Image (cartoon, coloured by chain):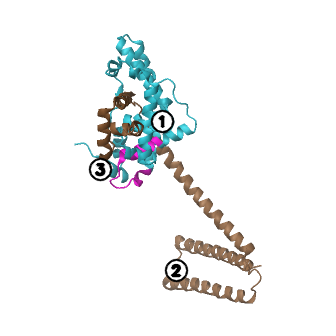
Chain colours: A brown, B cyan
Amino acid sequence: MLCNELKENLSAYLDNELRTNQLAGLTEHLANCPKCRAEHSRLIKVSGLVQNLPIPLSTARVFTGVRLAIAQEEIPGNSLQVLSGIFSGFGLLTIGFAALIVYSPVGLELLALIKAVARNFIDIGALAVKISTRISTGEPFGFWGWPISLSLFLGFGLAFYLLRKVLRSINLRGPLYE
Amino acid sequence: MPATDRDLIEKCQQGSIDAFEHVVNRYQQYAFKIAYGILGNVGDAEDMVQEAFITVHRQINSLRKGGAFPTWLGKIVTNLCLRKIQKGVKISSIPLESQESQQLSSPGTDQAYLALEAQQDVHKALLSLPLDLRVAVVLRDLQGFSYKEIAEIAGIPVGTVKSRIHQARTLLADRLSFIDNESFTEVESFTGDEGFTKGERR
């Protein structure tokens, strides 16, 4: 065996990282080659020196620092992440709707629909406020008060829905409420 | 009976801060040894250890069940140190920090002086190695990882680990001319003072 070929394996040999078939050949070669034996001995010394290198003791209060860093990171980080998530969500929705309105062949209808939905929500909100105010002020509803209120509420909703349908069928190309 | 790594990691994964404190205390010096070996500076090494444990806390749930925590931590520390060096951290040219200087200034035998000089030379030679070779030899000789573990940590084939360790040792041997002196065995037998640990294998 050539010394140069074997030398490559000397470190793995002293680290016990050679395969069995390589091990036998190298052990035999080392027994007969003073040059490789000397190189092996140098590598052992170097490895020993690095292993025995004094390492200072780490006296830092790592856990305290880690805990502080985690605490600082978590609170503002989380709320920031949530906020940025909300904003980017809204931003994407807005851009998406704007693109639909501008580029879609039914863009105007979509705009009208959004307006209608928004107005519906406002009306529903106003009604809810009125009802809750009446309930909280304790005005007597009487025996028929509740079913009448509920029927009226549902009736209004149904009427609104039908009205919208009729209006849409009459004026398909223009905004509904303009 | 002290809790096993596996128990502690499982508790950490369930969110136990006490278990995490145990893990930090158990592995602080271990992580420090790797960081110090690569960076050669106590302050930077401690910063990296802290960063490493913050990463551990963040990613503890990604450690698969039964996965080897020491190897995983070694990988985190090594990667952080490499990133720090790539960002341009200045590698310490004064090895072994102030504690050693105190030792050098105190009265002692010639043998002790020789030993300290030798240790400084070894440290300097280690820090002068190309980064990939330094990482390989630090993980092997300072921390005692197997070639397979080093391959996992560094993300390279085992054959490359073998070659890097051999190149690193050969370069060190060439740069440390005193190992060929007859007096070398006396220097080698010197053991350090308090405040230091030896780079013993795990």
Q: Nearer the viewer, mark 2 or mark 1?
A: 1
Q: Classify mark 1: residues with Cα within 10 Å, few (<14), some (14-19) or many (20+).
A: some
Boundaries of the magenta span? B59-78
Q: CA distance from mark 2 to mark 3?
A: 63 Å
Where residue A70 sits in the image (x, y, percent)? 46, 45
Q: Classify mark 3: residues with Cα within 10 Å, few (<14), some (14-19) or many (20+).
A: few
Relative side of A175 to B37, left or right = right
The amino acid pointed to by label 2 is Phe
Residue at which label 3 appears: B7
Front residue of A114/A143: it is A114
Identify the disc placed on residue B18: none
Residue at which label 2 appears: A141
Residue at which label 1 appears: B47
Quarter where residue A105 is shown: bottom right
Q: Is B65 in the magenta? A: yes
Mark earlier in primary sequence (1, 3): 3
The amino acid pointed to by label 3 is Asp
Locate the C terminus of chain B by quadrant. Answer: top left
**Vertical comparison of A125 with A72: above or below:** below
Q: Are marks 1 and 3 on the same chain?
A: yes
Where residue A13 sits in the image (x, y, percent)? 33, 39
The amino acid pointed to by label 1 is Asp
Locate the N terminus of chain B by quadrant. Answer: top left
Chain of the residue under the numbered disc 2 shown in the image: A
Q: Which element carries disc 2, helix, strand or loop?
A: loop
Quarter where residue A15 is shown: top left
Front residue of B199/A56: it is B199
Q: Which element carries disc 1, helix, strand or loop?
A: helix
Where residue A66 sits in the image (x, y, percent)? 44, 41
Q: Nearer the viewer, mark 2 or mark 3?
A: 3
Chain of the residue under the numbered disc 3 shown in the image: B
